[in-house]
Image (cartoon, rainbow, N blue to C red):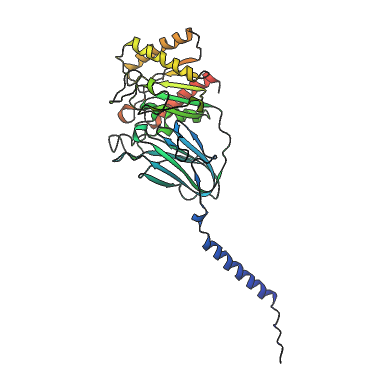
Amino acid sequence: MWLCRAKPLSLKMRNTICLLLFTLLSTAFATASPKNNELKFFKADNPNIRYVGRIDFSDRQKPRMWAPGVYIQARFRGSQCEIILNDEELGGNNLNYLEIVIDDNKPYRIQTTGKENTIKVPDGLADTVHTILICKDTESNIGYIDFIGFRCAQLLSLPAPTKRKIEYFGDSITSGTGMDMSGIQCDKGQWYDQHNAYMSYGPRTARNLKAEWQLTSLAGIGLIHSCCDLKVVLPQIVDKVFLYADSINWNFKNYQPDVVTVCIGQNDGPQQDSTLFCGAYIKLLAAMRQHYPKADIICLTSPMADGTLTPVLKRYLTAITAYINSHGDKKIYKYFFSKQYHNGCGGHPDMDEHKLIADELTTCIKQVKGW
């Protein structure tokens, strides 16, 4: 019997075999773990997701939002992220617009495509930590959004929120109606195709001041007289979540602003009875003071008001604030915008003008608050 002994492998041969094995294993793992499989689903009630605005949380798995300017924030790790949400899809072309902001870069605006939506953030993100903000750009009468959750590799906790809070009450101007012609021009498409709450004067002012914002606004609404067959006036919806339908009570403990602004009167027009208008405004401010005992409240003229309406509003607001101040509430202020802003659709302010309005209001709030 012959005994055979294998010849020892050379160092070069051993290195070659190791390299080959490493390459084979790397290829196998890459094939078994495609990038999409790394994404995990994080439900809407995840504690790392932050919500700001009047939202119906009766179903924590599907928080429902109608109001313009409601926004969601999160922080994720990875090069991909998917947003899962439902649109009420009221029928026809009634679909909401959203503003999406990644890492505080330039926002981009999209429209939902139907009842169920999976929205992927653009390719090209670095495989690192990112922030995301999703804002509802459209009015409450366009329908609600149900937020379902995120898909990403990892959802991380956000930094502590700013302590500054502002709430803006108003009509279509405050909602950001008729301002964004970047996709569809005025008198084309649907009336809400130019809505952009995120870029409207309120959120812009808040971002200037590093504050949170909340828009409690509805197109067509007035103080004592609304336009466009709207069945509610502002005093009715101060305490509501679904503004258009005057329904779902809002819990004011959820959001206590440092500053409240009121921009109303455009839809009432200049022909209203002064006693009725001023009396209703004083009652509105008294109700707000009950809800917001510490807030500074600033009464604004309408930035789109013409030469007929503006002097009327100035006269009314001067009398209203003087009356309330003389009765002990010194935290009620007035501010008159420097000119008419009306270059958007239907005489509304356009995108550039909303920036100018925000710059005016930013200066005003800095003076009031010392921020």
* Residue 21 horizontal side relative to residue 208, left or right: right
Q: Residue 155, percent across and down?
A: 54, 45
Picture residue at 37% right of the left edge, 15% below the top: 313
For this orientation, the residue located farthest to the top is 326
Tell me if residue 339 can be seen: no
Picture residue at 31% right of the left edge, 15% below the top: 270
In this rendered view, identify the residue nearer to me: 184 or 197. Answer: 197
Q: How many marks?
A: 0
In this rendered view, identify the residue nearer to me: 283 or 173. Answer: 283
Q: Residue 106, percent across and down?
A: 46, 40
Picture residue at 32% right of the left edge, 38% below the top: 90
Quarter of the figure with residue 136:
top left
Tell me if residue 39 can be seen: yes
For this orientation, the residue located farthest to the front is 58
In this rendered view, identify the residue nearer to me: 3 or 10. Answer: 3
Figure quadrant of the C terminus: top right
In this rendered view, identify the residue nearer to me: 371 or 154. Answer: 154
For this orientation, the residue located farthest to the bottom is 1
Residue 289's place in the image compared with 124, above or below, is above
Picture residue at 38% right of the left edge, 21% below the top: 236
Q: Residue 304, percent across and down?
A: 35, 23
Q: Residue 366, percent across and down?
A: 52, 22
Figure quadrant of the N terminus: bottom right
* Residue 196 horizontal side relative to residue 91, left or right: right
Quarter of the figure with residue 176:
top left
